[in-house]
Amino acid sequence: MEKISYLLFDFDGTIVDSMKFLEKNAIFLLNRFYNFPSAKAKLSYRQTTGLPFVQQMEMISPGTPSLNGEVVDKFEQMKIERIYEQELFPEVPQVLVELKNRHYRIGISSGTYEHIIIKYFEIVGIQVIDDILGYRDKSFEKGKPHFDYILKKWNLTPDNIIFIGDSLNDARRAVDNKIRFIGRLGLFNKDEFSQIIPNIHIISNLSEILPLFPPLGEEIWT
């Protein structure tokens, strides 16, 4: 198996402590527009989280495209009004800088619109990220399109990449594309992740990945 040289991180719930904020917004909208009880709204959101919200709504309420469009617009409006207030997990800046010092490439892969994520990192001032990839449309989204972009850009194989995320859909994407995966605890527990990837490596803090990735030689990118 080839050596990992590229670490790809999910955004919401992995790098940024934003999942409670997003889940609260989704529950509010599902209750208001579809009369979902809070428990049903919460379950529906969690079962589809990790996907772009437009795709979540296609799965949650497949027979109401017009209403779904209105709800997606409202969700994105609520998100952009407050997303820049959501804080990085405390360990993130130090972990990313240390990985960069060890000569790893670092990427972000998210279902959030790409321009939002780019602006977020401009605001927080993190400059060690090689690729910021978000949702543009269905032809460029988290999963195979993002993985293929990275593989081609950096001339890598799937064995060179590891994906770190907090959702079951993140884990499914990794498995489907033969990419190794580390799960971050948050909305989902180890047993839930293990149903997708037996013997999965689980973390509760990103600093826990540092012992897994010793320094690479500078020559790996020459």
Image (cartoon, helix red, strand yellow):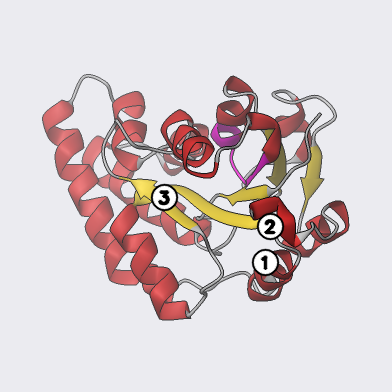
Q: Give the residue displayed 67% in from the left and 66% down from the top.
A: 100
Q: Is residue 107 left or right of residue 92?
A: left
The location of residue 143, given as percent across then percent down, is 48, 33
Residue 47 seen in the figure: yes
Residue assigned mark 1: 100
Q: Looking at the image, is mark 2 or mark 3 earlier in the sequence?
A: 2
Q: Nearer the viewer, residue 155 or 33?
A: 155
Badge 2, how many Cα within 10 Å: few under 14, some, many 20+?
many
What span is in magenta? 161-170
What type is the residue that disc 2 sits on?
A: Tyr
Residue assigned mark 2: 104
Residue assigned mark 3: 133
The location of residue 125, given as percent across then percent down, is 48, 80
What type is the residue that disc 1 sits on?
A: Lys
Q: Give the residue displayed 79% in from the left and 58% down from the top.
A: 217
Q: Is residue 2 left or right of residue 89?
A: right
